[in-house]
Image (spheres, rainbow, N blue to C red):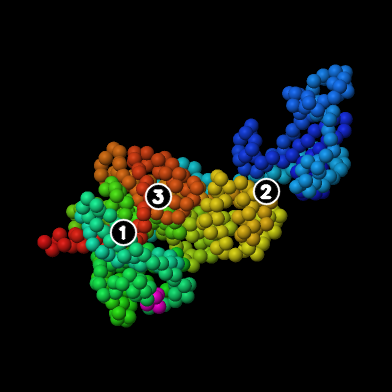
Amino acid sequence: MMTCGYDDPRCEVGLIIGTGTNACYMEEMRHISLVEGDEGRMCINTEWGAFGDDGALDDLRTEFDRELDLGSLNPGKQLYAQRLHKVLRRLVPTCDVRFVLSRSGSGRGAAMVTAVALRLAAQRRRLDAALAPFLLPPSTLQQVRDSMRAELEYGLKREAQGQATVKMLPTYVRGMPDGTEKGKFLALDLGGTNFRVLLVKIKSGRRRSVQMYNKIFAIPLEIMQGTGEELFDHIVQCIADFLDYMGIKGARLPLGFTFSFPCRQTSIDKGTLVGWTKGFKATDCEGEDVVDMLREAIRRRNEFDLDIVAVVNDTVGTMMTCGYEDPNCEIGLIAGTGTNVCYMEDMKNIETVEGNEGKMCINTEWGAFGDNGCIDHIRTKYDREVDEGSLNPGKQRYEKMTSGMYLGEIVREILIDLTKQGLLFRGHISESLRKRGIFETKFLSQIESDRLALLQVRRVLQHLGLDSTCEDSIIVKEVCAAVSTRAARLCGAGLAAVLEKRRQDRGVERLQITVGVDGTLYKLHPHFSRILQETVKELAPQCDVTFMLSEDGSGKGAALITAVAKRLHNVGQK
């Protein structure tokens, strides 16, 4: 088989018909229960000459076959070899089989097997060398956890303002839902290429419930990267369409604005944009109050009025949504296109806000962790290439190693490097592979799925314009796994820092806490959530954590924050 395979890459079966008979073929690893592993293929030596030794061919054997068998050196053995029929094409008409005569299979073939084994061993060494920096040992993850903890503490200090990379922004959300919230609320959700407007109806009491009606509007690239005035005029146009659609244009409803970008707040309804992320670059917005910009755009349109109660980060909304169901939820985590964490901090630890009583939600904006160089030792050359090619070089370094927006780009950079080394795609870098953004997170999730056979992985790669062999598919799957596993473990290390901080602040031996989670990477990737949770257990062993999936944190959460703010405002007035 190996001798003929050198001349014909489609040769996957070897057949001996001579003094004896035998066959071998390339079998899928997942079908070979005697060998560990599911990826790739392995040659199986059938030793089929013994077929029939259990009596399966007895009804076909003639008296001459029996006499021949009895007179042989091994009576009752190797019966199939005596009855081999040349009827292959009649028995498998759907297979177009080409027979290639082998030349010196036992000599030349043995050399081929040795050569292939040496090639695969050398390929393995180079692949391991490329992926080794992604395998973070426990000691490195502990360093990441401890560095994150130090940055969290530093960001809360008064003197750190303007210098801290992990911003630790006060949100002025001072309470969680208590079940008495009720009424109709509008929610706006801006955090990506789509913009949502929602009407949320909250009922309290025994039949407490949350009903939502929403409409999704696209934000074109020219609006995302145009002027701030154009962006907010577009947002107000979408609100007007929704109010018309719901027939509520005349009502002045309280509104919560989920604005999923770093904002420095001075009250719950004032938020100054620190800087754009996620591909937004609208001008004349950074350093401005986004609530004021929304109010001005509403005034320019002069069709309706709204009571803007709260500007909300989607991470805070995620925590609030889960807190409505579970009072033990005091942390919100986003692991999707971007990544972030918020948590309820003791007021006495927040030096940037007056007062020592109670708690306030802190929006960490941890995506910028490492922008000061504290995690440079774990950044690879691929991370640097992705960073340099991004819209914001040098910023959001932790996010670029852990979030869905960038993982596919890291994979693409690795594949280009491996192709240059001749380890992939026959050494040919296709036009598709040169395109930024070709590897979306959903493709990583599909390729890493346990249910996906290698043939289906090849189909995914072909859909991306990458003509791959079986070996290519195995390598691509391994690269995707290395990148996503590192992302999950880094995210887990960061979360462990927050959990350990809360445990020590409370002064308890064991912390019982719920983390509300949202984001496509966490929800849809086949292994991300499990690896993240395992890492948290390793690095924060004294914390008993329940992970709760958020149900529309950016929409429902914004309405709940608005409702809680109205409730607390009314209590304060009394």
Label 3 secondary element: helix
Identity, as a three-letter code, of the amino acid under mark 1: Gln
Q: Quadrant of the N terminus?
A: top right
Q: Kindly report which numbered mark, 3 or 2, lies closer to the viewer in this rendering.
A: 2
The foreground one among 526 and 108 is 526
Mark 1 vs mark 3: which is more N-terminal? 1
Q: Kindly report which numbered mark, 1 or 2, lies closer to the viewer in this rendering.
A: 1
Mark 3 vs mark 2: which is more N-terminal? 2
Q: Main secondary structure of the magenta part?
A: helix
The foreground one among 242 and 361 is 242
Vertical arrangement, residue 350 with respect to residue 132, above or below: below
Identity, as a three-letter code, of the amino acid under mark 2: Cys
The foreground one among 440 and 483 is 440
Identity, as a three-letter code, of the amino acid under mark 3: Gly
Q: Residue at x 70, y 56 (%)?
A: 427
Label 2 secondary element: helix
In the rendered image, residue 494, in percent from the top left (x then y), is placed at: 40, 50
- Disc sitting over residue 470 in the figure: 2
Q: Quadrant of the C terminus?
A: bottom left
- Disc sitting over residue 359 in the figure: none
In the rendered image, residue 544, in percent from the top left (x then y), is placed at: 34, 40
Residue 19 visible in image: yes
Hey, which quadrant is residue 72 in on the image? Answer: top right
Determine crowd level at label 3: few under 14, some 14-19, many 20+ residues with C-alpha closer than 10 A. many
Magenta stretch?
A: 230-234
**219 left or right, relative to 325:** right
Reading the image, the residue beneath label 1 is: 211
Reading the image, the residue beneath label 3 is: 494
Determine crowd level at label 2: few under 14, some 14-19, many 20+ residues with C-alpha closer than 10 A. some
